[in-house]
Image (tube, rainbow, N blue to C red):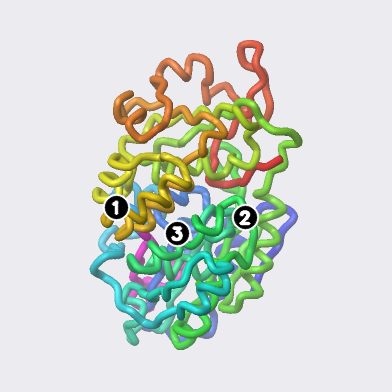
Amino acid sequence: MYVESKTPISDDELRELVRQSIAGRTLRKVLLLPPDYTRLYSGAGKITRLYWELLHDVCTVDIMPALGTHVPMTREECAAFFGPEVPFDSILVHNWKTGVEKIGEVPAEFVREVSEGLVDESIDVEVNRRLLDPSYDLIVSIGQVVPHEVVGMANYSKNIFVGCGGSSMINSSHMLGAFYGLERIMGKDFSPVRRVFDYAEEHFLKDLPLLYVLTVTTNEGDETLLHDVYFGRGRANFERAVAESRQRNLIAVGKPLKKVVVNLDPREFKSTWLGNKAVYRTRLAIADGGDLIVLAPGVDKFGEDPENDRLIRKFGYVGRERVLELVKTEPELKANLSVAAHLIHGSSDGRFRVTYCTKLLTRDEVEGVNFAYRPYDEAVKTYDPAVLKDGFQTVDGEEIYYISNPALGLWSV
């Protein structure tokens, strides 16, 4: 079942669609897998609340945000994302290091084939062991299809294998994407990483009672506009969502951009691990020698995970070739390939300058990871998010291109 609407889907329409997706099912226990607070504009929080409202009086409903390596959601974030009606004690925490079980392996020869020989190692398929609990009659994976730097287009089985997955798949998939090149991946289906996920979905998830709910959204300020929603198990729905997201979330700017200013909402972006979407999603649009100004008032760390944060601080965003060298010589980086991939993704390779404007990280911290620094309070005197509008405009006689939320698009020439 899927709905493609010329106008945003209303709350009443969405409630009816959610109701239809479970109509006729006999359910005793349900597991909901939404994204976390870092997908604030996905529409998934509202959908999760609707499932809870429709089901909690007739069966047990557990909610486990697909955290991947992110920090667990706070009580306040859960209330803001799902609504205060959803009890905090219904929220389970996924642990990507200790809470997973291996269910299979993607063979090395398959990985070698899809990566064009760049990677020649098998990949363990691990998922949170709750997904394997036979007492669940239905597992609902809820998420947003949008351009993504690792897999090409986010969601579908990525929500399972990364969001609810273990270190092997997270590390290997991120490095596979980095080796292949994010410029070749972003905004496209059938990337090497997606093909690995497809293999794992086909071979190792077929017995799970999975229902995918996929959204396509845009935003106007704080308002999320839900344009399309797709319910079902098959890949065809994902492909429809990819086509629709490419129409709505890929933005052609017409010419290389000399200066781009990106705002990171402090509610959503608290680390460069997340905030570097400002780098990933604009790099296809920025001119050689250009400037990327990142307004980051809520960023107070580099990695979401303490060990990832330490490694980012140690090695920094030093460019693709240097990171690949470090993977060969530094055992702790080789053991944390998702960090290595992140360092590659977040580096401009000297093609343009990245300036982080922060309140909570110091100049020494920002410059220590190879970014330029500017105090946030100084930067917003020139680039005020309360005044700027998305797109081209002139500030102090200079043309800039402003982006209020990098998570919802992919910008290119």
Decide which of tag 2 and tag 3 comes sooner along the chain.
3
Q: Is residue 27 above or below residue 146?
A: below
| Observer able to see residue 84 | no
Q: Quadrant of the C terminus?
A: top right
Q: Is residue 75 above or below residue 236?
A: above
Q: Which mark is residue 174?
A: 3
Label pair 2/3, CB-CB below 8 angstroms: no
Label pair 2/1, CB-CB below 8 angstroms: no
Q: CA distance from mark 2 to mark 3?
A: 14 Å
Q: Which mark is residue 275?
A: none
In front: 74, or 319? 319
Q: CA distance from mark 2 to mark 1?
A: 27 Å
Magenta region includes residue 319? no
Q: Residues within 10 Å of mark 3 (few under 14, many from 20)?
A: many
Magenta residues? 51-68
Which residue is identified by label 1?
A: 330
Decide which of tag 3 and tag 1 comes sooner along the chain.
3
Q: In the displayed structure, does residue 254 sit left or right of residue 193?
A: right
Q: Kindly state the secondary structure of the residue where label 3 is placed.
A: helix
Which residue is identified by label 2?
A: 184
Where does residue 115 sit, x and y in percent of width and height?
A: 55, 67
Q: CA distance from mark 3 to mark 1?
A: 18 Å
Decide which of tag 2 and tag 1 comes sooner along the chain.
2
Disc 3 marks a residue whose amino acid type is His
| Observer able to see residue 275 | yes
Disc 1 marks a residue whose amino acid type is Glu
Please identify, in this view, whether the residue under mark 3 or under mark 1 is nearer the observer: 1
Q: Is residue 320 above or below residue 32?
A: above
